[in-house]
Amino acid sequence: MTRGPTTAKKKDSLAEDFLRHLAVERNASPRTLKAYRQALGAFRAKNGTPWKQCTPDDFRDYLFAIMKRGQARSYVRLQFSALRAFYKFLTERKKLRIDPLRQLQLPKVEKKLPLVLTRQQIEELLAAPLKTAKQRAAPEWMPLRDVAVMELFYSSGLRLSELAALDVEDVDLYTESVRVFGKGRKERVCPIGAPALEAISKYRSNANVHSEALFISKSRKRISSRSIWLILKRYLRHTSIPISISPHKLRHSFATHMLDRGADLRSVQALLGHASLSTTQIYTHVTVERLKKAYAEAHPRA
């Protein structure tokens, strides 16, 4: 049953209590809070029934409606992940007796193997900033910053948001490590390779960066995640790499190359900050597929 627009505009105290619970007790990131708020709001825009009166049919109808719009299955699962977390909160904290989402079956997401760069392609990409003409208005230190950004990205397998959020004090040159706050503000420490350490030191010295944000823009403010994306796209145009890549593909490449060289899955899981080993296992499939391809190309009786 759908309510009129007046009902939808009333303050949603249950949803606000849930989001406050995520922020305060679960230490959820601003990005997670925004995604969950949008998911709850999207459902309320379609169905104005009070949360505690919603039935399984309400959610089946909503599922069919967004599937009919052609939304990706990953999007559908994200929306219902937020709704399920909300109803778990209602049953545990708000005396809701029956969870209407408990029996709902969601479409499975087709797992695609992530695209990764070869080690030769990585080398070409990391060399691009110092071989590319500097933009006219850019400071002299900017190519050094770009080298440091990409070297650290690949060296430590960070997420884009984690990289942009780094402060100078997070990088310890003596222990050769970086302190990262990942999803849910969970802290982890990742090693940094010698080329990345050298690139960071050279950039900081030339850019006179000694405190607060590690990577800065020409206006000396913290660089944004979008800016890092644009940096990568710019230098990609100056390489022979034939595929379009996102910053996340440097993370994929980090994990795959680690496994290729004999790292164990648990270590790679810890370095990536994955809560579940199953998330990391996708990279073992990439490695196996690469081995199969090499076998098929090289073995005389393949």
Image (cartoon, rainbow, N blue to C red):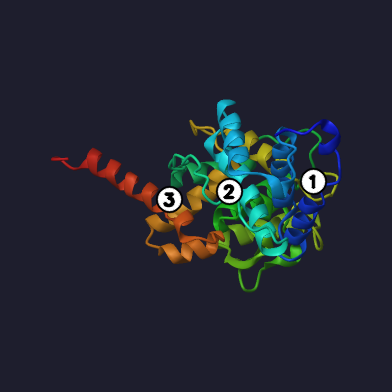
Identify the element where label 3 is drawn: helix
Seen in the image, is 9 located left or right of residue 156?
right
Front residue of 114 and 250:
114
Which mark is nearer the camera, 1 or 2?
2
- Residue 293 at x, y = what percent? 29, 41
Identify the element where label 2 is drawn: loop
- Residue 78 at x, y = what percent? 60, 44
Question: What amino acid is at disc 1?
Answer: Ser
Q: Which residue is mark 2?
A: 101
- Residue 289 at x, y = what percent? 33, 44
Which mark is nearer the camera, 3 or 1?
3
Q: Which residue is mark 1?
A: 217
Give the farthest residue toward the top: 69
Answer with mark 1 or mark 2, whichever residue precedes in sequence. Answer: 2
Marks 2/3: CA–CA distance: 28 Å
- Quarter occupied by residue 218: top right
Marks 1/2: CA–CA distance: 46 Å
Identify the element where label 1 is drawn: loop
Front residue of 229 and 78:
78
Q: Which mark is residue 282?
A: 3
Give the farthest residue toward the left: 301
Q: Quadrant of the C terminus?
A: top left
